[in-house]
């Protein structure tokens, strides 16, 4: 059986292969309790973002868990309101104040600039990246990357970047594989992470996936997370309850066959959020 409990980023940094997502989880004591419990359970990777407005709770949960900071992998993202060099640095400082941490394990550009003439938005994206490179060079961020960047956003970007992105976080799930972008990233040594791997809940009752789960004694969720890992993609899962958190972690004791992987790959379009980077309003 293939061991998939961690990945190695292109700069050598090791990252746990399952992230605990926090999107749409409001900042409150219940979130702190839920995240701290998940860390005690064994989660070591927490994904947050400035726009989620819960970074303070993430930091509190890490401290409440009793787990050493150096044993955790913490990722946050810079929102689209901060694209200039100085604005990125200020946004990063604000994130660190909310988290009350000395460093981040990974920091991402949340969405690419895509508006207007291509030369203009390409210039904006690489300008934003220059600030990210400074943070990386200063050591306050251990790895830097992007989110929702498609191939045409990456091509010119990579030609100008001094530091190659370590991560590209994409909407990725059965029924929306973004195969062209995933293959490009994997060829370039950029780890793809999957946000919304369950397709916003649309995949939980797909008969083809349920049948595969029955064959392994696993849930649909577990099959999808395992499918992500075997495709070399790191899934980010939002889980509020200990029951679901434990379920999501139980994906390392089985392996999908080549035929099962192909059957999931072949599913038609479903579960897509409709958020296309070239057409979002933010």
Image: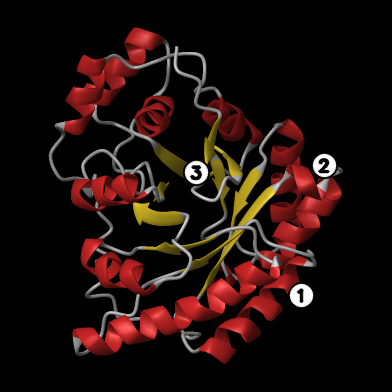
Near-viewer residue (152 or 220): 152
User: Disc 2 designates what residue?
Assistant: 67
The kind of secondary structure element at disc 2 is loop
Residue 1 placement (x, y as % from top left):
45, 11
Nearer-N-terminus badge (3/1): 1
Residue beneath the point at 46% across and 81% down: 128
Write down the quadrant of residue 48 in the picture: bottom right
The kind of secondary structure element at disc 1 is helix
Near-viewer residue (210 or 170): 170
* Mark 1 burial class by Cα count in 10 Å: few <14, some 14-19, many 20+: some
Residue 33 in sight: yes
Residue 56 placement (x, y as % from top left):
73, 67
* Mark 2 burial class by Cα count in 10 Å: few <14, some 14-19, many 20+: some
User: Disc 1 designates what residue?
Assistant: 97
User: Disc 3 designates what residue?
Assistant: 237
Residue 50 placement (x, y as % from top left):
58, 72
| 225 over 127 or under it: above or below | above
Residue beneath the point at 27% across and 79% down: 114
Nearer-N-terminus badge (3/2): 2
Q: In whole angstroms, how far apart are the C-alphas of marks 3 and 2?
A: 20 Å
Near-viewer residue (52 or 191): 191
Residue 172 in sight: no
The kind of secondary structure element at disc 3 is strand
Q: Residue 210 has which mark?
A: none
């Amino acid at each position: 059986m293939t061991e998939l409990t961690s990945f190695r980023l292109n700069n050598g940094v090791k990252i746990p292969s399952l992230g605990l997502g926090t999107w749409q989880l409001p900042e409150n004591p219940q979130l702190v309790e839920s995240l701290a419990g998940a860390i005690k359970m064994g989660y070591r990777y927490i994904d947050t973002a400035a726009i989620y407005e819960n970074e303070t709770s993430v930091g509190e949960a890490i401290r409440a868990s009793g787990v050493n900071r150096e044993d955790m992998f913490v990722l946050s993202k810079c929102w689209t309101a901060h694209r200039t060099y100085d604005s990125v640095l200020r946004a990063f400082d604000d994130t660190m104040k909310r988290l009350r941490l000395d460093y981040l394990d990974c920091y991402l550009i949340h969405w690419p600039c895509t508006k207007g003439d291509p030369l203009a938005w390409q210039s904006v994206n690489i300008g934003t990246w220059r600030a990210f490179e400074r943070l990386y060079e200063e050591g306050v961020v251990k790895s830097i990357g992007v989110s929702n960047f498609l191939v045409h956003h990456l091509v010119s970007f990579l030609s100008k970047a001094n530091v190659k992105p370590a991560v590209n976080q994409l909407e990725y799930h059965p029924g929306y594989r973004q195969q062209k972008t995933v293959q490009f990233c994997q060829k370039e040594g950029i780890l793809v992470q999957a946000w919304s791997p369950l397709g916003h809940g649309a995949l939980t009752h797909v008969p083809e996936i349920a049948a595969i789960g029955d064959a392994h004694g696993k849930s649909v969720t577990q099959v999808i997370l395992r499918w992500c890992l075997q495709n070399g993609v790191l899934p980010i899962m939002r889980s509020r309850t200990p029951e679901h958190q434990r379920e999501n972690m139980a994906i390392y004791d089985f392996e999908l066959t080549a035929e099962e992987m192909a059957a999931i790959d072949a599913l038609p379009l479903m579960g897509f959020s409709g958020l296309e980077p070239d057409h979002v309003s933010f």
